[in-house]
Image (cartoon, rainbow, N blue to C red):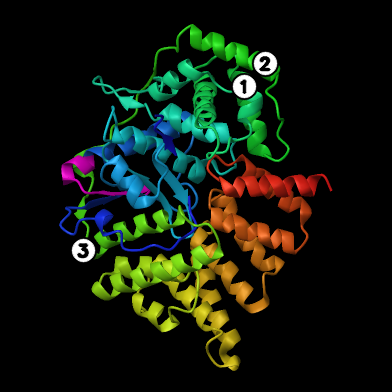
Amino acid sequence: MRRLFGGAPWLASLWLAAFAVPAQAEWHRIETPEFALQADMEPDALRAIGAQLIDHDRLLRHVLKVSGPGRGRRIEMVIYGEHAELVAASGMPAFAGGFFSANPIENFALLPARASEGDYDAVETARHEYTHYFMARHLGTWQPAWYIEGLASFFETARRGPDGLMRYGRPSEPMLAFREEFGGLPFTDIGAMPDFRGDPTRIGRFYAQAWLVTSHYYMGGRQARAIGAYLDAFAKDPTSAPARIGGGDAALDRDLDAWLAAGVPPEIEVAIPPADPAAIDVRPLSPGEIRLVDLRLEIYRLGSKIDGFGDAVDAWSSLTSRTKEIVTAHPDDRVVGLFAAKMMLLGDIGEITSDEIGAMLDSAATGTEDRILQARLMTRRADEGPPAEFHRTIAAARATLNDVLKTNPDNVDALVAMFENIRQEEGASPAATAYLEKALAIDPANAEWRMTLLELYMRDQRKAEAIALLRTIVNLPHAGTESRMAADLLRKLTTG
């Protein structure tokens, strides 16, 4: 999440027509192996942003020593409207410049195209959110909360200069200004993410100090080696990593203050091959896909207001009705059908039938996503048919998922579908839970999968695994209520 100084269950409220995506909007979309990007922009403008994100990806790979396609799903990025409009339409916190969410439907980032006041750079926000995604997809481990936010803030200012060289390390002006005015938090405090609903100044100090520690590390400050050793230990086992930087937190704080007072070193220059905007394919969104933009906004807006089980049921009822309406209006749009089927398979409050979900899918389609959704629907149908057919239907669905996983063992959607399949046949057994554990190891920021796994650990009295998972939840930058609940439960489990 990028902050403007100055994630998501569901809720009930529907049809904020004033905030709906305009039907006449000229939305376009580009797709690469790492990201899909769509916005109400002219093709050339969207290509230019896409090229900068490709450059950013290449820079991150170079600096972080990453190669290969990464694990899990690529990110869906949506650029939408003016900041205040986006806050109203999506429920995004007003202090945020954008947000990244890993959820059962997709890995998703939402950011405004412009701000109502002050300087705003949509590409900087895109770099920030993309860096969050890059960490989740390529680094493959839990990270300290301060490093999650610090790395995104550090790399958001990266750019290609007029001489063709990429540069990184330029101070984040909002972070620098905030720290200069209010100061940072000591390192002993930034290990525990402050409550977003608490003192906003303290939250800002956390972000500013996280940027400073990360900048000090990558720019070769005196404590760079000690910070690196801490991060290495955390990557190996976050639940047993040292609570302090080698040499002492107080010494780190003094060296950080002295380093900043002396002036942040010049940007680091790197020769990174540039992306060619002309080589990026752009296509217009279909009318149905434009409606999906509005549906995505509503999902996150409703989620931001949930305050209990009843709210969640009402929200799901509203979203089910809205999804049915969009599918009915665009029956031949396969993108709409896939998204809607995936969404409707997440939960069941008795307002949609398996036949209705089946009508959203193309039964003859052989794409990976099509096959996974077909298998998930078969798993759902197993209980609806004759008892004699139950195991046969389960086995047929499982065979499809096994074929997908043979080709791509890191397909998180197939892993979770396998968890659902085994759970349907034999309950949430250790064999079923193992698939959910694999998915969460690949996509550690997925809140819904994380909470499902925690419930299973608690049910099965797997105390050590529950404690390890709770510690990672407490560490999350944006968990909010989830983090506070995890902290309370962790205290109970570790103090008897």
Q: CA distance from mark 3 to mark 1?
A: 51 Å
Mark 2 residue element = helix
In front: 234, or 326?
326
Q: Is residue 106 above or below residue 48?
A: below
Q: Is residue 147 above or below residue 494?
A: above
Q: Earlier in the sequence, mark 2 or mark 3?
A: 2
Mark 1 — residue?
A: 186
In front: 37, or 145?
145
Q: CA distance from mark 2 to mark 3?
A: 57 Å
Type of residue at label 1?
Pro
Q: Is residue 14 above or below residue 210?
A: below
Q: Is residue 290 left or right of residue 179?
A: left
Type of residue at label 2?
Ala
Q: Is residue 11 left or right of residue 471?
A: left
The residue positioned 61% from the left and 76% from the top of the image is: 424
The local crowd at label 1, few if under 14, some if 14 to 19, many if 20 or more residues have their Cα within 10 Å, is: some
The residue positioned 55% from the left and 75% from the top of the image is: 398
Q: Earlier in the sequence, mark 2 or mark 1?
A: 1
Position of the N terminus by quadrant: top left
Q: Magenta stretch: residue 490 in it? A: no
Residues in magenta, as a range:
33-47
Would residue 64 be seen by someone viewing this image from the given angle? no
Mark 2 — residue?
A: 250
Q: CA distance from mark 2 to mark 1?
A: 8 Å
What x and y, as percent, mark residue 18? 25, 55
Mark 3 — residue?
A: 287
What x and y, as percent, mark residue 437? 63, 57
